[in-house]
Amino acid sequence: MTKILNFGSLNIDYTYSVDHFVRGGETLSSDELHIYPGGKGLNQSVALSKSGAEVWHAGAVGDGDGDFLVDILKEAGVHTDWLCYTEGKTGHAIIQRAADGGNCILLYGGANQKITRDMADKALENFGEGDYLVLQNEISEIGYIMEKAHERGMKIVLNPSPMNEKILTYPLEYTDYFLVNEVEAEDICGEPGEGDALLEKMADRFPGAKIVLTLGSKGSLYWNGREILEQSIYPVKTVDTTAAGDTFTGFFIGGLVQGLDERAALDLAAKAASIAVSRPGAASSIPSREEIN
């Protein structure tokens, strides 16, 4: 059986409903405050599990405030054997959600930045050749985790978000699947571009990788090493885009691991993401496979 290890972040999301994103020097009142489970890692694990795949989550939460995030994973059917507790606070995000459904996010790493090489070794020793490793960019020791997973013959899935200068220090050549938006792809390639042309630049730089390039309302493009596949969105009234990309990632990879062909996995992911943006919250907005069907 192919196994999936998601080594990723867990955050507490403080979501403020605002008329517009706060500007420098401005004091802005919010209409509402909601507290949700989040973090790109947690979101993607929930999406993977809800797609029907079996997934293990490795990561860390604070020893006094992270229990409810662990419970969320367990309730979604995610295995939490290699989750650790650290001193201090769980990672959290301050999210401004504007009237049009867009969001602006400020992150505090907390326990996510206390991942050690020992934690990584203990988790990875339970996985081997052909298993999948899913990574984002919200935890420490990502480069080390990629190196050790590559040594074990695992397939590495990288969603390099949030994009920063650390990304280019990782052994990106080990990546089997990239899931990137246009800004992330431009930063990785070091030059501007869009659509097919940008996807081709990514493919030239990483000839051994398969690449999903998400285009927002224009859908997504996928390079599988032979051809470019196009996937449109399913239009809905947008309420909150916070977990749209994570939902897409989880259902696409989950679909592939469960035997769907690439076109079917892309379509499943697009449907799941459309449902997610139609309601508030991050992990709480992710639909089940049955709901999509």
Image (tube, helix red, strand yellow):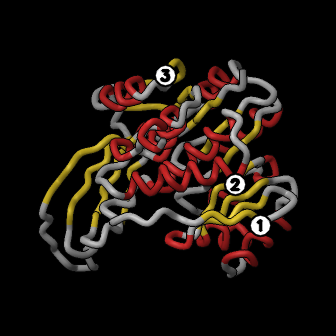
Q: Secondary structure at mark 3?
A: strand
Number of numbered labels in the structure image: 3
Q: In which image quadrant can residue 189 be found?
A: bottom right
User: Which label belongs to residue 178?
Assistant: 2
Q: Residue at x 62, y 30 (%)?
A: 5
* Crowd around label 1: few <14 · some 14–19 · many ≥20 (10 Å): many
User: Which label belongs to residue 202?
Assistant: 1
Mark 1 or 3, nearer chain start: 3
**CB under 8 Å between discs 2 and 1:** yes
Residue at numbered disc 3: 80
Mark 2 or 3, nearer chain start: 3
> Which residue is at the front of the view, 218 or 86?
218
> Which residue is at the front of the view, 81 or 106?
81
> Three-letter amino acid code at disc 2?
Phe
Q: Secondary structure at mark 1?
A: helix
Q: Residue at x 65, y 71 (%)?
A: 187
Q: Residue at x 38, y 43 (%)?
A: 283
